[in-house]
Image (tube, helix red, strand yellow):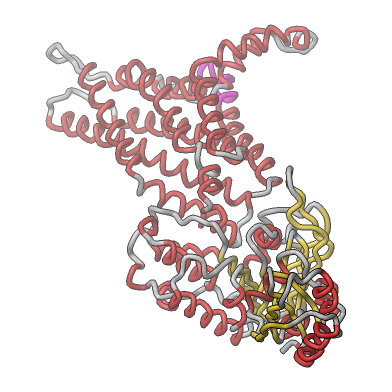
Amino acid sequence: MTAIELRGVTKEFADVTAVRGLDLSVEEGEVYGFLGPNGAGKSTTIDMVLDLVRPTEGTVRVLGRDATAEGVAIRRRTGVLPDGFAVYDRLSGRKHVEFAVRSKEADDDPDALLDRVGLLGDADRKAGGYSKGMRQRLALAMALAGDPDLLILDEPSSGLDPAGAKEMREIVRAEADRGATVFFSSHILEQVEAVCDRVGILRDGELVAEDSVEGLREAVGGEETLEIAIEGDGDESATDAVRDVDGVSRVDRDGDVLVVSCADGAKTRVIGALEDAGVAVADFHTREASLEDLFLAYTEGDAPSERAGEAPEEVSR
Amino acid sequence: MSLVAIAEKDFQEAVRSRGMLILVALFSLLVAIFAYVVRPTGQGEQFATEALLSFAVGPFLVTTLVPLVGVVVGYNAVSGERESGSLKLLLSLPHSRADVVFGKVIGRGGALALAVLAGFLLPGLVLFALAQTGALATFNVGAFLGYTVFAAVLGIVFVAITVGCSAAATTQRRALIGGVAIFVLFVVLWGFVTGQLLDAASGLIDPLPVSQRQVRVFLRVANPISGVELLSSAFLGEQLFSGETVNRQISAVSMLVFWTIAPPLAGLWKFDGDDL
């Protein structure tokens, strides 16, 4: 079964179209990382999955049910860590978790849940006095109540220190091992790489790429990036010559330096092409494309979005 | 189940607030002051519980302060959670928006009722003790307790009206404006507004088999404050649901039920369609 299925979903607000024509499927049991810069429409998408916001067009189905018509039934089997939430200042941490357990008609021990997120020592304190990270842990404990089939985590690491973020990843992993589907959003790629089976990248309300992290890396053709310092005033011909080389996916000009994203074997051809064009190479070195480069390639301007769309499925997992 | 969980959560939150304590203290203090003012001066004169309630506590405390407190307790019920973001936490759990609105009415209405009961009971206990020791000739416990229940009912009705308004409001500011409007309408302007409406609609009423006067009487008891006043004075006069005002009393009761259910429903209708 498909845990989350969006078909042709568009959401228009009064002044902005937050999501347009979005198709997205998250399979049962997978860990799906939902990436994109701030303002890309991630939270709007998650809000539609949770029925906080209704789509202008298209259908949203969660755990086989319609998100709007059967929201309560969906949320009975879903754990949610929302973004930009507030706690009830006057209630203790334990009261919050008790409330979640009771609302889901589950039989978890609130203390066990609090212990799991490392909050047991502060369980009797009023949540109004919690730090941002503690509030995040508290909401996670509430989300884990009732062993949900689906976990939806919106920017789960925000407010957490590195150790907290690591614990968060471990909990995500453990929930996935239990068989739960995990869908989480982030604007930091490193956080998703370690735990995700698949990632989708959202930009301006549209899914520009969807694959495993390795698959995306190959799709961008970024096994390596060449930085070539050229001599002379170097007109456009240098850039054009390199762009025409087979295996080159992207060329940027930064003063005297050409930054070339290319496949492994294309390095010598790039240098050759420059020499053929009469451009003198002063120096060059290679570096591996960082995840950040990869992410930026998709979220800023000239991403090879068509190619990513064609990226072969078999590279995932 | 979901409704009860939310109501309980909201009740717990409300009774933990400092405002709750202030409210109980304020009610106790005012009732005690009024009791002192109307105390029997002459020897052997009886302590008039009914007079205390219908001439002092009633007009000053119940018909203005209780509605005001109801509005204060209710106005931020939904809009406050919406603005802070705790509504996201609440609706992440398997609750419907209807559960949220009616759970709030029950939870906050319950908390207000508790404050009214506690606020009246403390001075009530003192009066009862004085009557027992003979310092006070009589103290009508039944009338005092019964009147307290009417005051609590009025508070709950105002909580319900204001929670409905809070559910419909997209911001705290609008909810506050709505709350103020509700208070002004029912406490200050009711007679004026309904009079104007009646004059404007007289052409519509004439063909109907009711007189202008009947409509006027109905509109008067349609205000929950007048309704509770009517019912409580009938109760103190031992004429509840009997005597010549029985028809008006029934109208008043049905309007109290209406005000408890209709505004939250109207608010829910708006809230249910909103993007949060």
Q: Which of A186 and B236 is in front in this view?
A: A186
Closer to the camera in the image, B188 or B238? B188
The stretch drawn in magenta includes residue A46: no
Residue found at x 56% / y 12%: B191
Q: Image quadrant of residue B95?
A: bottom right
Q: Is residue A71 left or right of residue B107?
A: right
Q: Where is B168 relative to A259, above or below? A: above
Q: Quick check: B263 left or right of A308?
A: left
Q: Nearer the viewer, residue B276 or B95?
A: B276
Residue B256 visible from this viewpoint: yes
Residue visible at 68% across and 40% down in the picture: B270
Figure check: B248 above or below B268: above
Report x, y in % for residue A244: 87, 79
Q: Dominant secondary structure of the magenta stretch?
A: helix
Name the residue at 78% across, 91% down.
A268
Residue A259 image position (x, y, % from top left): 71, 76
Residue A3 in view: no
Quadrant of the image for the N terminus of chain B? bottom right
Q: Is residue B181 left or right of residue A47?
A: left
Q: Where is residue A74 in the image (x, y as percent from the top left)?
A: 68, 66
Residue A105 position, x and y percent, is 55, 68
Which residue is at the front of the view, B260 or B131? B260
Magenta range is B243-252
Query: Residue drawn 63% across and 60% down?
Result: A38
- Residue A21 falls in which quadrant of the image? bottom right
Q: Quadrant of residue A113?
A: bottom left
Instruction: Determine if the magenta segment contains residue B245.
Output: yes
